[in-house]
Amino acid sequence: MEQLIIFIKKEFKHVFRDNKTLLMLFGLPIAQIILFGFALTNEIKNSKIVVCDYAQDISSIQITERIASSKNFEIKKTIFDKEQIEESFREGDVKLVVVFPANFHKDLNHFNTAQIQVIADASDPNTASTLTSYINNIVRGYQQELNMTSMGSIKIVPEIRMLYNPELKGSTNFVPGVMALVLLLVCVLMTSVSIVKEKEKGTMEILLVSPMNPFTVIIAKAVPYFFLSLVNLTLILLMSIYLLDMPMNGSMVLLYFVSSILILCALSLGLLISNVTETQESAMLITLMGMLLPVIMFSGFMFPLENMPVPLQVISNIVPSKWYYIIVKSIMIKGLGIMSIWKEVLILSLMTSGLLIVSLKNFNIRLQ
Amino acid sequence: METETVIKAVDLTKKFGNFTAVDNISFEVNKGEIFGFLGANGAGKTTAMRMLCGLSKPTSGVANIAGFDVYTETEKIKSHIGYMSQKFSLYEDLTIAENINFFGGIYGLSDKELKEQSNSLIEKLDLSKNANKLVGELPLGWKQKLAFSVAIIHKPSIVFLDEPTGGVDPITRRQFWDMIYDAAESGITIFITTHYMDEAEYCNRVSMMVDGKIAALDSPSNLKEQYGAATMDDVFYYLARQAKRS
C-alpha cells in the first residue's frame, strides 16, 4: 500500500513537470470544444418515426402512405394516443412523431385548412431540422396535388415542435461527443505513453526487478490519470454548461458514474496499447490513428449513424464512445435516469471489463 | 573462512522456440565476489541475467539466488537483489532526492532508514548542493554513479550490473569501480557484464559466454595463462571468434 502511494506521488510529479502532458491534458479539451462548435448537415435515410393518428381518415392515411414510401422515413408504428408520444421517444430510436388531429379530412374539406403537428427529437439538431423539412416537403406535395384536383386553395399547416432542444443548438449535439472524444483520447494517450515511457527509458525493468507487484505498477499508473480525467470531465462540463448553455437535466451522479466507466475503458485501452508498443511515438501514433477516426466517425456526433451503410453501422457498435454518447445525451438533454439507459450502460461496462481483462492478461504474459 | 555461495546455476537453459539463447550453463558465485559476465553481443548474457533476476522463467535447469529458487521464489529474490541496466534508469524529471526516496520506498525502506540512507548517499557522492536538481541535468558519469548507489540502497545480497559503464569517461569509470569495490567489501556480491576488457581485469573471476554456453570461467590471471594471452582482450578475441551464430 505504501509502495502504491509512493508510486502515485511519483506519477503526479511526472505529469505536473511535463508541460507537453499538461497541455495535452487540459489544452486539448478546450480546443476541441471550441473547434467542434460548427455542425454538419447530411441527408438522412430511413429514420424511424411514429404516426399518432387521431383522424384515421382518407387524408391522414394518404399522407402517412407518402411518408412511408419516402426513402427518408420508416414508420415504426402508428399510435392513437398522445400519451404514447413521450414514451416512443424514450425508446431511443424514434426521431420524430407526426400527429394528425381528429377530423383532419373534414377540416380540410370544410375550412380548406387543417393542422398537423410534427414533433422532433432535437437533441440532435441537425437531424431534427432536416427531418422536419422532409416532412414539410411531403405535406406540401400532398397539398399541391389536392389543389390541382379541387378548386379551392387547401392549406395544411404543419406545426413544428422541437423536443428536448427547442432552440436547435448545435452544442447540445457536439458536447457529449467531444466529452467522449476527449476522455477516450486523453486517457488512452496518457496511460499508454506513461507506461511506454518507462519501457523506453529502462525504468520499467528496474520496477519489474523490484519487489513491487506488477499490478501495483498498473494501479499506480491508472489512479492519477483516472483522477485527472475526472478533473478534465468537470472542466468540460463547466465549459459546456456555462459557456455553451448546454442543458443538464439529469443526475450529475449518474453522469460521473458512467464517465468513470468510460475512463476505465480508456485506461484499459491505454494499457493494451502500451503492451504492444515499444516507443512513445508509436504509442501516440496508434492512439491517434486508432482512436481519433473511429470515435469521430462512429460516435454519431459528427455524422448521423442512421445514414451509414449497414456494415459501418454494425462496426459502430464496437466503438465504446458511441454508447457513451447516447448515454450522455440521454442524461444531460433528456434528463433520463438509469432505468432508461441501463442497456447502454451495461454494454459499456461489459466492453470495459472485457478490455480490462485482456490488457491485464497481456501485461502478465509479457512479464514471463 | 568458509565461502558462502549466493548464486548457483546448474544446467540453466532458456529456449525461445527453436532458438536456444542460453544453453546448459552452470556456475557458482560466492558472497562478496566481483563476478564478470562477459560475451559478445547476442551470446546470451542478457537472457541469462534476466533469468537470474527472476524476470524470465528458465526452460530447464536449476538456479538459486541468495538461497531462493528462480522458479518459485521470484518475489523473495527480487527483494534481495539490486539491478542496474545498461540504459540509464532513474527518472530524469525527478530530483536526486526524489529518485532516492522513490526507489528506497518501493524497496520498502522505512522513513527513518530512507532519510539516513539518502543523506549518507548524497554526502558520499558529493551531491549535497545538487540534491534538489533534476536528475536529467546531471552529467552521465554522475547519473551512473547515482544509479548504482540507488541500486544498492536497500543493501541487497547481490547487485546485477548490466553494462553499467557504457559511454562513461575513463576517470568516472575508475571512480565507478571504486564504488563497486566498496560495495563488494561490505558483502554485496557484484554480478557485472561489460564490454571493456580492462574492467574484466578488475573482476575476481570472469566467465565468457559464447553461443549461449560458458566457454571459459576463471580468474583473469588464470585465463590469460590458460590461453597464453597477454591481455583479457586477447582471451576475448580468441573465444569470441569461435562463435558460430552471429
Image: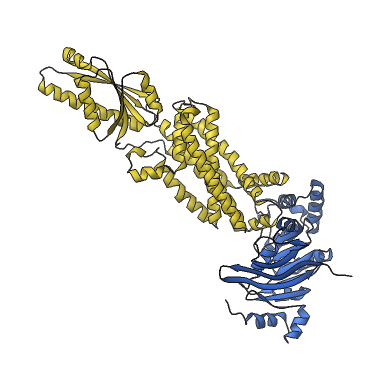
Q: Which residue occupies the foreground of this view, B166 or A322?
A: A322
Residue B97 picture location, percent across and down: 74, 50
Please tell me how many numbered marks the rendered image carries: 0
Colour scheme in use: by chain
Q: Image height check: is A96 above or below A277? A: above
**Residue at the limit of the structure toward the top, as seen here:** A110
Question: Which image quadrant: the C terminus of chain B?
Answer: bottom right
Residue B99 picture location, percent across and down: 71, 52
Residue A190 picture location, percent across and down: 55, 47
Residue B82 picture location, percent across and down: 74, 60
For the question of whether residue A345 can be seen, the reply is: yes
For the question of whether residue B166 can be seen, the reply is: no
**Which shade of the palette goes to chain B?**
blue
Q: Image height check: is B76 above or below A230? A: below
**Which shade of the palette goes to chain A?**
yellow
**Residue at the limit of the structure toward the bottom, as seen here:** B228
Residue in the image at 72% along x and 85% along y: B227
Q: Quadrant of residue A264?
A: top right
Question: Which image quadrant: the N terminus of chain B?
Answer: bottom right
Residue in the image at 51% along x and 34% along y: A236
Q: Is residue A47 left or right of residue B202?
A: left
Residue in the image at 78% along x and 62% along y: B67
Q: Image height check: is A306 above or below B94? A: above
Q: Image height check: is A209 above or below A328? A: below
Q: Is residue B149 left or right of residue A270?
A: right
